Amino acid sequence: MSAPRFLGTGRCVPDRVVTNDELSEIVETSDEWIYSRTGVHSRHFATHESGLDLAEGAARQAIERAGISPEDIAVCLVGTCSPDRASPSTACRLQLRLGLPEDTICYDLNAACAGFLYGVRTAHALLADTSRPYALVIGVEVLSRMLDMQDRNTCIIFGDGAGAAVIRRDEEASWKCEFGTRGNETAIWVQGPGPEPSFIHMDGKPVFRFAIDVVEKCIRRLLAAEGCTLDEVDLVVCHQANARIIDHVVKKLRARPEQFFKNMETYGNTSAASIPIALAELDASGALKPGMRVLCVGFGSGLTWAGMLFRW
Ligand code: COA
């Protein structure tokens, strides 16, 4: 038996705030349309900040709040689908910025909006036989660089930012998790490096249907595996893609809306960064207390998903 234990969290977003009203000067849309369809009022777009800068800001906060030293970190994983460079990885570059030991296991992983939870799962496994006790797991995105600002279907949805957590293995604790993917290449996709600008393409309706279906089923399966009810979970933190997705899931599960955290209003959809940003915000506000039962579900391009039910 063993589970990841969260020791400290952090978040970092670019300075520039872009409101729906600003976007409505670029494409034909309105604050009313965007807010009613997505729950987003504003998001942050990077200007002078790189993804590495945002990742570093979130990581430093998480390390400080965990009360550990960078020398005690054995694993540094970065979930991202919008890295500054194809190579070296953001995690490698963080090794130098943060002063992590040279033998730290550092790499990026791409599981789209589920990237942070894939990172936690992988880091937990890697920590089983490292000589130092802690892992740094980060989700960071600069999605604004992949947005076609003429496409009102996508440019209104996404935002930039980073969230981070320091975890260790708790050999006394247990958790339930699940991971899945469907090999879908058409619902949300990005071409990647090449001569043309590489934009996010999205077919919104199938993504919406996938999300409400998979989040509901994933939550039901995790609860069944744990042998508890949703009432016995203190907080559900879903990927902050869209408020309506969360509202549909709440209705399907007949849950209490206040159990399901939402902060997309001021961040937009920050993909791999959304869950760690949410956890860091909750942690900083004192809403997360040791021993609380927390359920996280990420979902996105792939169509990939991940769920985790654990104790804070
Ligand atoms: N402003 C105003 N009108 C818009 C618009 C915008 N930003 N984007 C699309 N429209 C228009 C469409 O052109 C369409 O017009 P038409 O009827 O004249 O053709 C109309 O609004 C309805 O479009 P539709 O695509 O049916 O809207 P929708 O209700 O499905 O909402 C999304 C679109 C993208 C908000 C919705 O599909 C969604 O949230 N999908 C999930 C996306 C997501 O979460 N992605 C990330 C997952 S990780």
Image: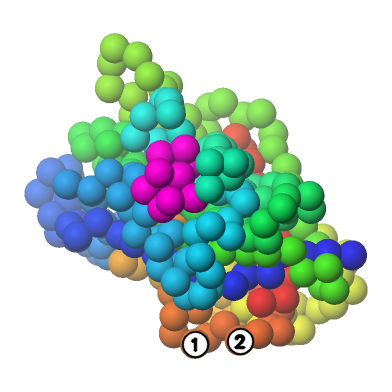
Instruction: Decide if ligand 1 comes within 8 Å of the CB at mark 2.
Output: no
Is residue 138 found inside the magenta-colored segment of the image? Answer: no
Seen in the picture, residue 290 relative to 41 is either above or below; the reply is below
Q: Circle 1 is placed at which residue position? A: 286
**Amino acid, disc 2:** Lys
Dominant SS of magenta comes to helix
- Residue 141 is marked as none
Q: In the image, residue 214 lies at what x, y percent?
A: 68, 52
Q: Circle 2 is placed at which residue position? A: 289
Circle 2 sits in a helix, a strand or a loop, which is it? loop
Q: Is residue 130 left or right of residue 40?
A: right
Seen in the picture, residue 303 relative to 68 is either above or below; the reply is above
Number of other residues with Cα within 10 Å of mark 2, as a class: few under 14, some 14 to 19, many 20 or more: few
Using the rendered image of the protein, determine whether residue 270 is visible from the camera's viewpoint. Answer: no
The quadrant in which the N terminus is found is: bottom right
Q: Cα distance, mark 1 to mark 2?
A: 7 Å
Residue under the image location 85 percent in, 73 percent down: 172
Number of other residues with Cα within 10 Å of mark 1, as a class: few under 14, some 14 to 19, many 20 or more: few
Disc tally is 2
Seen in the picture, residue 120 relative to 287 is either above or below; the reply is above
| Nearer to me, 60 or 299 | 60
The quadrant in which the C terminus is found is: bottom right
The reply to whether callout 1 and callout 2 are in contact (CB within 8 Å) is yes
Q: Which residues are magenta?
A: 91-100
Q: In the image, residue 106 lies at what x, y percent?
A: 55, 41
Seen in the picture, residue 200 relative to 11 is either above or below; the reply is above
Q: Is residue 10 left or right of residue 6?
A: left
Is residue 97 found inside the magenta-colored segment of the image? Answer: yes
Q: Is residue 290 left or right of residue 40?
A: right
Q: In the image, residue 243 lies at what x, y percent?
A: 46, 65
